[in-house]
């Protein structure tokens, strides 16, 4: 913790005089958020890789040989995009929710509120750091997955876009959770009773099209279904829905959450209390 404190002291948020004060404060906040998760890289980058490796061993290697889709895609190839995106989503959410909530809990948020930062700059600084962490975790998971199977990488640019939008979406969701939560218990509700069910019921380990009605229809109202299928389509070249549909839905949801975050940063009393 002493090393982290020293590094954060060097990038303490301040409000210098002049026309560039707002941008300088934004740069400082972004740098602080990046250094914050890099200082505990063992937790932020290594732990998700261990989890993904266990999933690959259990569902990919052990069970994968007994599951057949009747096509060119094996079960382990089917699972890998979902596992990578799960790492992206979890880390994007955890980065923004934990950072902002701890700042509220410890009272450090008051130091930020006296800076000339705008709601847009708050949003960009927290979200950009979360996206960097999430994409780094996703890349490492895909690297580990390469030891188990090969992926066709049908549309790499689309895969990067889909991963980036997914990270942005849940970075924004993490900000909303942190702004709303009054205690650690409240924050854990978002993780345990909202985030995790959405991930596991979004078609990560199974094709949603194989579900009987009405669960097939219900699953299509799950936003994670569109994220996972869009990323899977970009990596494997096959999916239940088109990439355009998945990407459009994801961008639309991100825009809605961004509007909510901007409103909460600008007027919500929960940011100050």
Image (tube, rainbow, N blue to C red):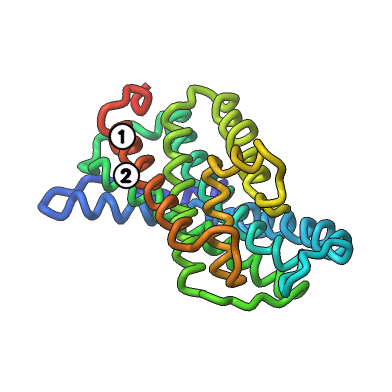
Determine the residue located farthest toward the front in the rendered image.
213
Depicted 153 relative to depicted 32: above or below:
below
Q: Is residue 47 left or right of residue 255?
A: right
For numbered disc 2, what is the local secondary structure? helix
List x then y, in percent, for residue 130. Answer: 47, 52
List x then y, in percent, for residue 138. Answer: 59, 62
The quadrant holding residue 70 is bottom right
Residue 122, label in figure? 2
Determine the residue located farthest toward the left in the rendered image.
19
- Is residue 35 visible in this depiction of the protein? no
For numbered disc 1, what is the local secondary structure? helix
Dot 2 alpha-carbon crowd within 10 angstroms: few under 14, some 14 to 19, many 20 or more:
some
Depicted 95 relative to depicted 218: above or below:
below
Q: Residue at x 46, y 73 (%)?
A: 157
The quarter of the picture where the C terminus appears is: top left
Q: Residue at x 44, y 27 (%)?
A: 180
Q: Earlier in the sequence, mark 2 or mark 1?
A: 2
User: What residue is pinned by disc 1?
Assistant: 265
Structural distance between the alpha carbons of marks 2 and 1: 8 Å
Q: Is residue 207 left or right of residue 159?
A: right
The quadrant holding residue 172 is top left
Q: Residue at x 74, y 58 (%)?
A: 50
Front residue of this view, candidates 217 and 8: 217
Front residue of this view, candidates 121 and 237: 237
Residue 183, label in figure? none
Dot 1 alpha-carbon crowd within 10 angstroms: few under 14, some 14 to 19, many 20 or more:
many
| CB atoms of marks 2 and 1 within 8 Å | yes
Front residue of this view, candidates 10 and 185: 185
List x then y, in percent, for residue 158. Answer: 47, 69
Q: How many labels sit on residues?
A: 2
Depicted 110 relative to depicted 136: above or below:
above
List x then y, in percent, for residue 270. Answer: 37, 24
């Amino acid at each position: 913790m002493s090393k982290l404190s020293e590094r954060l002291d060097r990038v303490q948020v301040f409000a210098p005089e002049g026309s560039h004060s707002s941008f300088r404060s934004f740069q400082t906040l972004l740098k602080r958020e990046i250094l914050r998760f890099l200082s505990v890289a063992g937790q932020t980058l290594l732990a998700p890789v261990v989890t993904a490796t266990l999933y690959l061993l259990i569902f990919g290697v052990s069970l994968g040989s007994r599951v057949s889709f009747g096509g060119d895609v094996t079960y382990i190839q089917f699972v890998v995009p979902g596992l990578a995106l799960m790492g992206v989503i979890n880390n994007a959410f955890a980065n923004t929710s934990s950072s902002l909530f701890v700042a509220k809990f410890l009272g450090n948020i008051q130091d930020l509120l006296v800076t000339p930062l705008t709601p847009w700059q708050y949003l960009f600084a927290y979200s950009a750091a979360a996206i960097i962490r999430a994409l780094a975790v996703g890349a490492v998971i895909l690297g580990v997955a390469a030891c188990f199977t090969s992926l066709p990488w049908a549309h790499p640019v689309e895969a990067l876009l889909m991963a980036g939008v997914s990270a942005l979406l849940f970075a924004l969701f993490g900000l909303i959770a942190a702004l709303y939560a009054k205690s650690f218990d409240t924050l854990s509700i978002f993780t345990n009773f909202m985030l995790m069910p959405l991930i596991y019921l979004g078609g990560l380990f199974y094709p949603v099209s194989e579900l009987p009605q009405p669960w097939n229809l219900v699953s299509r109202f799950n936003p994670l279904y569109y994220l996972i299928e869009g990323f899977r389509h970009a990596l494997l070249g096959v999916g239940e829905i088109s990439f355009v549909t998945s990407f459009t839905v994801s961008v639309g949801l991100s825009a809605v959450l961004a509007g909510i975050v901007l409103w909460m940063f600008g007027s919500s009393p929960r940011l100050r209390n």
